[in-house]
Image (cartoon, helix red, strand yellow):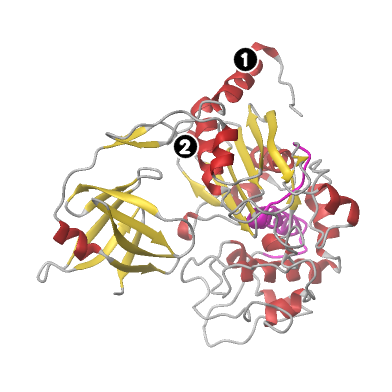
Amino acid sequence: MVQQPAGPDGEAIQQRLEQALQTMVPLVKVAGRTYRSRTVAELMQSENVPGISVAVVDDGRIVWARAYGLADRATGRMATPETLFQAASISKPVAATGALALVDQGVLSLDRPVNEQLTSWQVPAHDFSETVTLRRLLSHTAGLTVHGFPGYSSEALLPTVVQVLNGAPPANTETVRVDVQPGSRWRYSGGGITVAQVLMSDATAEPFPALMDRLVLRPLGMAHSTYKQPLNEADAAAAATAHNAKGEPIAGRFHVYPEMAAAGLWTTPSDLARWAVALSSAFKGEAGGPLRPETARAMLTPGMGDWGLGVGLQGEGNDMRFWHNGVNEGFRSIFFSYPHRRQAVVIMANGETGNEVLGPVRVAIGRVLGWPGSEQRTITPVPVSRKSRFEQVGYYTHPSFSAHIGLRDDGLVLVPSQGDPVEALPQQEDVYALTERGDRMEFQRDKRSGRITSLTLGRLTLQRVR
């Protein structure tokens, strides 16, 4: 399916997008190394990713939607733009839209303690002076534990959402509880979004999938989307199968997520694009969308951690964008939406190594649409002493991110606690460039001893712990 835009300009964009995915080049190249362009199919094959699905928005409408590869490698079933993929954590901002719709209706409050409206479960008592509110849940500042959820095999006994929050069998995660002062810092918490799921259902006496269908999915025409976990038989048969890092189908085809608001949305890139367009339109002041304009603007206002209410935020002015990515067992996804440009991209993959494809595809599309950060850059390494590199090796941590720095060839390698290793090439004695996106990594030394004490990555400062 491709939603045809009017006029030759729209057709030209389609042609340029098709060409971009057949001649992809890396975002960053290293001087002295040879590169060749690759097609999306070649990249998928090299990274063991069976299938991807893509939707692009320009001028406030879907202008291009394509699927590549297989929905299921075992059966050879092809992926189509209508194939359902697990959105994983992109479930969160869509769920946040539903919660904010209830705020607009006066059913929920952003700033009341959530325990005043929770009936089936309560946030456990704690010794901190501040309380857990919906605003803090959606912005990941509620001080709640449990980063994410691994899901359950299709044959496993499923816990109720209350058992998940209590960490009670058969749940496979710990109790969701407050362990830092609410409102004091940003820390990603799937547990907090699961509390919001229960709050929404308790306040309306509606099952969460039906509630989201009523508030968001049906009004926005998201006909290929559902929060039902597990899927019904017909939808399951048509959905994409999750695949491991070797490109093999996982047992039972995919995991089940009772943590629906945090990880349970089944959808398509085109449906997510419809949601992004509607939210962008509300942000720009247009009425009739899922949220009041003032609520949409609150949702897309950056707070701690450059996070709004359910979404990450980057850039300023015309280049401001909201975004989120998703990681479920055997699925990867990402979206970026530029409300002022009226542009967006959504990409979904059914492979554990899908990020190795999603990133280059997003960059290729960004070059067509003129997005900042999509220009190819060249890193030229400079020689630094081996002694200096040995001194930089160690483990570094921040409340939201940690990584090990190791030696590699004439540079270093950054190994994050979650994610793939990234090569780092020296630019100065204590300054490196990451080959994935060209990001700057700089080490700080104690002025007296000369010992490395921390490193900075973008806006994050990671302290050395060993």
The crowd level at tag 1 (other Cα within 10 Å; few <14, some 14-19, many 20+) is few
> Which residue matches tag 2?
317
Q: Earlier in the sequence, mark 1 or mark 2?
A: 1
How many discs mark residues in the rendered view? 2
Q: Is residue 10 above or below residue 204?
A: above
Q: Nearer the viewer, residue 140 or 369?
A: 369
Q: Does residue 441 appear left or right of residue 248 in this picture?
A: left
Q: Is residue 96 above or below residue 425?
A: below
SS under mark 2: helix
Q: Does residue 386 appear left or right of residue 139 in this picture?
A: left
Residue 397: percent from left, percent from top: 37, 68
Residue 298 visible in the current orientation: no
Name the amino acid, label 2: Gly
SS under mark 1: helix
Q: Quadrant of the C terminus?
A: bottom left
Estimate the spatial distance between the alpha carbons at disc 1 and disc 2, rounded to whole Å: 25 Å
The image quarter in which residue 107 lies: bottom right
> Which residue matches tag 1?
9
Closest to the camera, between mark 1 and mark 2, is 1
The image quarter in which residue 407 lies: bottom left
Residue at 33% across / 56% down in the picture? 413
Q: Nearer the viewer, residue 208 or 299?
A: 208
Q: Quadrant of the N terminus?
A: top right
The crowd level at tag 2 (other Cα within 10 Å; few <14, some 14-19, many 20+) is few
Q: Please provide the residue range marked out in magenta.
A: 81-109
107 in magenta? yes
Q: Is residue 34 above or below residue 133?
A: above
